[in-house]
Amino acid sequence: MEQARRDAILELARAGHKPAAIYKLLNYPKTTVYRVFNAWEAEGKVCRKAHNMRSDKICTPRFFAGLEKSIKALPGTSLSRLDKNHGVSKQLVSKAVNEDLGYRSYRMAKQHILTASMKATRLTNGKRLINGLKSHGGRIIFFSDEKNWTVGRSYNVQNDRWLAKEREEVPAVFTTKFPASVMTLGVICSTGEVMPPFFFNPKERVNAERYCEVMEEVVIPWMKDNAAGREFIFQQDSAPAHIALRTTNLFNSHGITFWDRNTWPSNSPDLNPCDYYW
């Protein structure tokens, strides 16, 4: 309601007019007149209650420029911090950032640090790997990887919530510093076959001796059965047990071709389908 209407009603009320006469004289809605009149009698004033400024009055070009300046200065600032810094609601900041300025909130990805020498080595190894694939186009590839499983409840601090009226009603999630774990070995063939996962004994140390036992008793027979006389090559990472001389001699004695540490790029999870297997 405009303040001028309130003042007009108040002036007639002070002159002794009743609401019934006021709304007839001013031709204002009856409910409006009675609301202002009753407020004047109860509180002695009819000023409009304090309210927040409309969003279209706040979202000026100057506001958008200041908001974008804050984002560019510290892109990691949360929306909650932005609304406090600019003295507006979180909903208004969210709308301004997403719809008006065109920003989106993304999670920061973790990547392996690569030095200049590491990049040069990866480039050399990558070219060697590609040339080998070109010269043996029909060769089967067996990819391998190991996964250490920990026995404990899966818990995400951010996403796992509990609805309750009091904090004391929320149960705790108990964890241990050194949970029980078990190492698993998986092998996937480029033709689609998947070897049943091999589980080492709990707390077992997978050294070169134990690794060779598993290769000779489980993995190599499975690869030969699936290859069925076709040419194949074995892939493994550069773990100490994998590149040990004992392991190399074992593969050579069985006529197994494999990519050595100078061919397969280290820290390349996107190259190994086993990383999507777990």
Image (cartoon, rainbow, N blue to C red):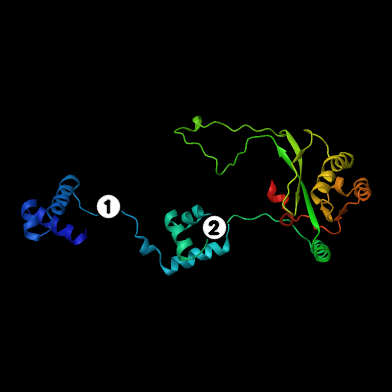
Residue 260: x and y in percent read 87, 55
User: Residue sitting at 55 percent across and 40 percent down?
Assistant: 160
- The amino acid type of the residue labelled 1 equals Lys
Closer to the chain start, of discs 1 and 2, is: 1
Closest to the observer, 160 or 235: 235
Answer with the quarter of the image where residue 71 lies: bottom right
Vertical placement of residue 210 versus 109, above or below: above
| Crowd tier of the residue under label 1, counting other residues whose Cα lies within 10 Å: few below 14, some 14–19, many 20 or above | few
- The amino acid type of the residue labelled 2 equals Ser
Question: Residue 135 bears which disc, if any?
Answer: none
User: Residue sitting at 86 percent across and 47 percent down?
Assistant: 242
| Crowd tier of the residue under label 2, counting other residues whose Cα lies within 10 Å: few below 14, some 14–19, many 20 or above | few
| SS under mark 2 | loop
CB within 8 Å, label 1 to label 2: no
Q: Which residue is mark 2?
A: 105
> From the viewer's perspective, is 91 left or right of 220?
left
Closest to the observer, 107 or 92: 107
Residue 178: x and y in percent read 72, 34
Q: Is residue 88 visible?
A: no
Answer with the quarter of the image where residue 171 lies: top right
Residue 13: x and y in percent read 10, 53
> From the viewer's perspective, is 15 left or right of 210?
left
Q: Quadrant of the N terminus?
A: bottom left
Which mark is nearer the camera, 1 or 2?
2
| SS under mark 1 | loop
Inter-mark Cα distance, 1 to 2: 37 Å
> From the viewer's perspective, is 73 left or right of 278?
left
Q: Residue furthest bottom?
A: 61
User: Residue sitting at 34 percent across and 56 percent down?
Assistant: 52
Question: Residue 49 bears which disc, if any?
Answer: 1
